[in-house]
Amino acid sequence: MVMWVFGYGSLIWKAGFQYEQKVAGFIKGYRRVFYQGSTDHRGTPAFPGRTVTLEPAPGDLCWGVAYKVNGEDDENIALTYLEVREKQYDQKIYVDLFTDPSSPIPAVSGVMVYVASPDTKANKNYLGPAPIEEIAKQIIQAEGPSGANRDYLFQLEEALNQLGCQDLHVRDVANAVRKILKEIKIES
């Protein structure tokens, strides 16, 4: 058995499970957005952090990494781990992974990806869109068992830079957080 998992957030730099192969690539028709609340990793129920999810965006590409998990035992261990780690993401979808922007043929089909839907009945932690400054302020203040929300943001920005990917939403949020932190430092 072979399973492929696509990571577009913290899975890019921290898989947390055994894998046989890691492939940088992109999926089509989605964009990464800081619309999902995190009450278990980068925030708390009283003050949720913000993590990324995917939203449909025709014509857009979302870069990340795909992990190939081979063998029934490793697949079961990875799925058990991911179901706990990604429990606030209410959907699993299957997508095509591309590695060559000029090729219409996917490198891998049927790649599993966890997504937080905007359905607030099914997904109690969906925060949705907000002005960049509001998202930045929330990220600055939030912290959870996995650490400060701003660390997640900056690690994601760095991981995307290492892939050679410019994600405008991540860049804009990171720059807004840096600007606010600089202003706070100047005032104190």
Image (tube, helix red, strand yellow):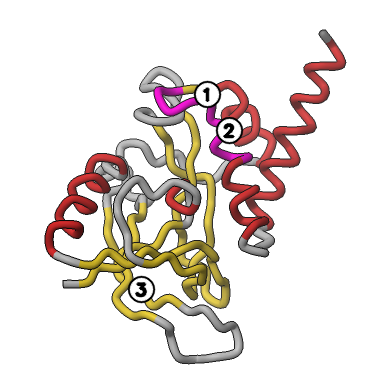
Q: Is residue 45 magenta?
A: no
Q: Residue at x 40, y 18 (%)?
A: 46
Q: Identify the element where label 1 is drawn.
A: loop
Q: Which residue matches tag 1?
A: 142
Boundaries of the magenta span? 144-154
Q: Residue at x 33, y 55 (%)?
A: 114
Where is residue 157 shown, x and y percent of the image?
64, 48
The residue most toward the right is 186
Q: Identify the element where label 2 is drawn.
A: helix
Q: Which residue matches tag 3?
A: 95
Tell me the CA gap for discs 2 and 1: 10 Å
Residue 23 shows which numbered tag? none
Q: Residue at x 43, y 65 (%)?
A: 22
Q: Relative to 92, is 124 above or below?
A: above
Q: Which residue matches tag 2?
A: 151
Q: Amino acid at mark 1?
A: Ala
Tell me the CA gap for discs 2 and 3: 28 Å
Q: Relative to 166, is 25 above or below?
A: below
Counting residues from the start of the chain, the first of labels 1 and 3 encountered is 3
Counting residues from the start of the chain, the first of labels 2 and 3 encountered is 3
Specify few, some or many for label 3: CA neighbours under 10 Å numbering under 14, 14-19, or 20 or more. many
Quadrant containing the C terminus in the rendered view? top right
Counting residues from the start of the chain, the first of labels 2 and 1 encountered is 1
